[in-house]
Amino acid sequence: MKKEILFYSTNKSCPPVPFSVALLQGQAPDYGLYMPEKIKKISGEEILSFKNKSYQQIAFEVIKNFIPDVIPDDKLFSMIKEAYNFTIPIEHITENFYIIRLDRGPTASFKDFAARLMARFMEYFTSMNDKHLIVLVATSGDTGSAIANAFLHMKNIDVVILFPKDEVTEKQRKQMTTLDYNIHPIAIKGKFDDCQAIIKKAFNDQNFKNLNLTSANSINIGRLIPQSVYYFYAYSRIDSKKINFSVPSGNFGNLMGGVLAKKTGLPVNKFIVAVNKNDEFPGFLKTGRYSPVVPSKKCSSNAMNVGHPSNLARLMDLYGGWFLDVRDEYGNVIKKGVFKKYPDIKKMRKDFISFSINDTEVDNVIKKYYEQYNIIIEPHGAVAVASAEKSNIKEQPIICLETADPAKFSEKIEEILHIKPEFPKSMEKLDTKKEKFEIIPNRYEKFKEFIKSIFT
Ligand SMILES: *Cc1c(COP(=O)(O)O)cnc(C)c1O
């Protein structure tokens, strides 16, 4: 008997599908996001046994719990071993304060965790039926490079990356534009939200039906599930019954990984939802009313410049709500972030606290951690650390997620600390490589012409 768990759309107007379909589709046909119909518990005993297991072993058990009987055990384990071939340091700062570094993958951001496993999932399912796939991804900086790197040279898969021309750092851009082969980067003269809007439109464009488009954004359930694992790992390495996590958040995919972990049984007291000046979520928790930040605000933590996080649809859904964008008959969004059913906000306030951190606070905390603890953090991690400090939680440990290597933001670090962070090996050669990318205006028709010119 197959025990496969199906995945439903948060918009509830299309039938549930198996994992492989949800993965290869990305977004559901009704514009919803896929969620598992059933979230199996992992027992307390098993969670305790993680103390003696490697990251790869923990990943295997956690992922198998979400998608039992989908991929043969030996195959799944070898994918995991290949994907997670880097270190995951946990730094102890003060008595109850930790930083987990999720920045040691090949593109030096936490996006590698999701991208590297998702690429292997997709290759597995496409090679089974010899399908060609085009992965479309919008990035505010780090997703693009992680996806590009994870999918480089994969057979049967091309990757198209859209990034906001003036909102990524030079290093981030070069990580996407120096690869070539099956990787096609496009700079859009607009903001991250514009890139995301173009991609969402492409998925529902009848003209592209024969191209097998799929999404690698955090709307893809294949990215979310791997992001659950490091929460279990962190818990297993720290001696405490309950813990708190401070999560630097943009599209809330990282946070959703943690929330899924809690749903399966991880004893999390609170998630500290750390955002920059794009403060729609702390505003919602406080007032109960949701208003997206339009246009999104530009902050030094540029991968978090998101004014209307797509994963909120999932988060609200898990708390009994029904949250969506209202669309016209052509699929164009006419109103962002509307409740068809209101979530259990009392419960949300129990599980989450949320802070908005400005760029000056970011600079100050980077300085403080260098001077007091001799530790270099970068703007995204700094948003998490500053939020954790504001939370005033003292009862249990807080683990802050550091999501990028400071060297990715070397200009910023030099400006504040007057030192040059060391480059990870993977980034050393970037400046000598040749860049190749297209620049197009912020217009859907222009994007469409470009796609047609490469793939038809
Ligand atoms: C993407 C990203 C984030 C935000 O993660 P979400 O899953 O979008 O909330 C935070 N920090 C860094 C460095 C990132 O690349």
Image: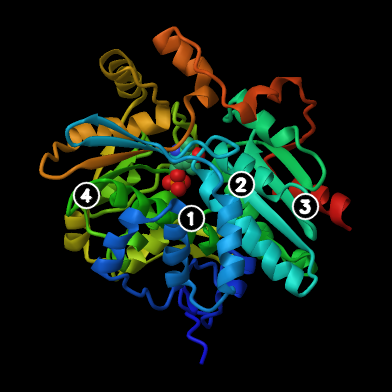
Mark nearer the viewer, 1 or 2: 1
Residue furthest bottom in the image:
1
Number of residues whose C-alpha sits closer than 10 Å to that of mark 1, classed few (under 14), some (14–19) or many (20 or more): many
Q: Can residue 342 be seen?
A: no
Residue furthest left in the image:
395
Q: To which quarter of the image does residue 439 belong? A: top right
Residue labelled with disc 1 = 56
Question: Gap between marks 2 and 4, in whole Å?
Answer: 33 Å
Kind of residue sitting beneath label 1: Gln
Number of residues whose C-alpha sits closer than 10 Å to that of mark 2, classed few (under 14), some (14–19) or many (20 or more): many
Name the residue nearer the viewer: 236 or 358: 236
Kind of residue sitting beneath label 4: Ile
Residue labelled with disc 3 = 448
Q: N-terminal of the two: label 2 or label 4? A: 2
Mark nearer the viewer, 4 or 3: 4
Q: N-terminal of the two: label 1 or label 2? A: 1
**Residue for point 40% across, 12% down:** 416
Where residue 331 appears, as percent x and y from the top left, is: 59, 65
Element at label 4: strand
Q: Horizontal placement of 404 versus 357: left or right? A: right
Mark nearer the viewer, 3 or 1: 1
Where residue 213 appears, as percent x and y from the top left, is: 71, 62
Q: In which quarter of the image is the C terminus?
A: bottom right
Residue labelled with disc 4 = 243
Residue labelled with disc 2 = 138
Where residue 19 appears, as percent x and y from the top left, is: 55, 73
Question: Gap between marks 3 and 1, in whole Å?
Answer: 40 Å
Circles 4 and 1: CB atoms closer than 8 Å = no
Element at label 1: helix
Q: In this view, does 424 lie above or below 372?
A: below
